[in-house]
Amino acid sequence: QVQLGESGGGLVQAGGSLRLSCAASGSIISINGMGWYRQAPGKTRELVAVITSGGSTNYADSVKGRFTISRDNAKNTVYLQMNSLKPEDTTVYFCNARVRSRARPEYDYWGQGTQVTVSS
């Protein structure tokens, strides 16, 4: 089994910063892409940022220049540094990892979600 554990969400004023972390654990052989997504109530889940095992990144246009994704392959952990936060960034953020494990050749795992609230 593979689990993704998220941390770092919370309440911050507009213009402030938060750093999300997500650590993968379990019977992991390797991890390909890792990323962050967000989903507002009644809306579809949307990509925020993704990073490959080699460090290539991709961002949603709405967060470019404000958010930075990074990963520590030795710790199976992905981070999302969020700066210049806006009220419209308020929602639940989900971690994703494409994992090759002993149980499955390759599978997308999801974290439980962490709430980010930005007050105006």
Image: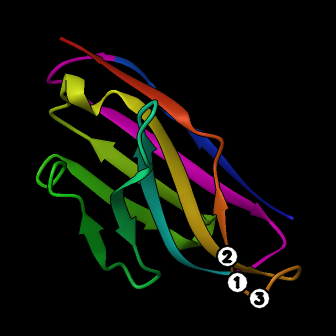
Q: Are marks 3 and 1 in contact (CB under 8 Å)?
A: yes
Q: What kind of secondary structure does the magenta stretch mostly adopt? A: strand
Q: Are marks 1 and 2 in contact (CB under 8 Å)?
A: yes
Quadrant that contains the N terminus: bottom right
User: In the image, is residue 25 part of the stretch drawn in magenta?
Assistant: yes
Q: Position of residue 39 (x, y in %)?
A: 44, 41
Q: CA distance from mark 1 to mark 2?
A: 5 Å
Which corner quadrant of the image does residue 16 belong to?
top left
Residue 99: image tag? 2
Instruction: Give the magenta range.
Output: 12-29
User: How busy is the neighbourhood of tag 1: few (under 14 within 10 Å), some, or many (20 plus)?
Assistant: some
Q: Which residue is mark 3?
A: 105
Q: Position of residue 114 (x, y in %)?
A: 54, 33
Of marks 1 and 2, which one's residue comes earlier in the chain?
A: 2
Residue type, mark 2 in image: Val
Label 3 residue SS? loop
Q: CA distance from mark 3 to mark 2?
A: 8 Å
Residue appearing at x 20%, y 30% in the figure: 85
Q: Which residue is mark 1?
A: 106
User: How busy is the neighbourhood of tag 3: few (under 14 within 10 Å), some, or many (20 plus)?
Assistant: few
Note whether 37 is above or below 17 in the view shown: below
Label 2 residue SS? strand
Residue type, mark 1 in image: Glu
Which corner quadrant of the image does residue 25 belong to?
bottom right
Locate residue 75 relative to residue 8 in the image: left or right. Answer: right
Of marks 3 and 2, which one's residue comes earlier in the chain?
A: 2
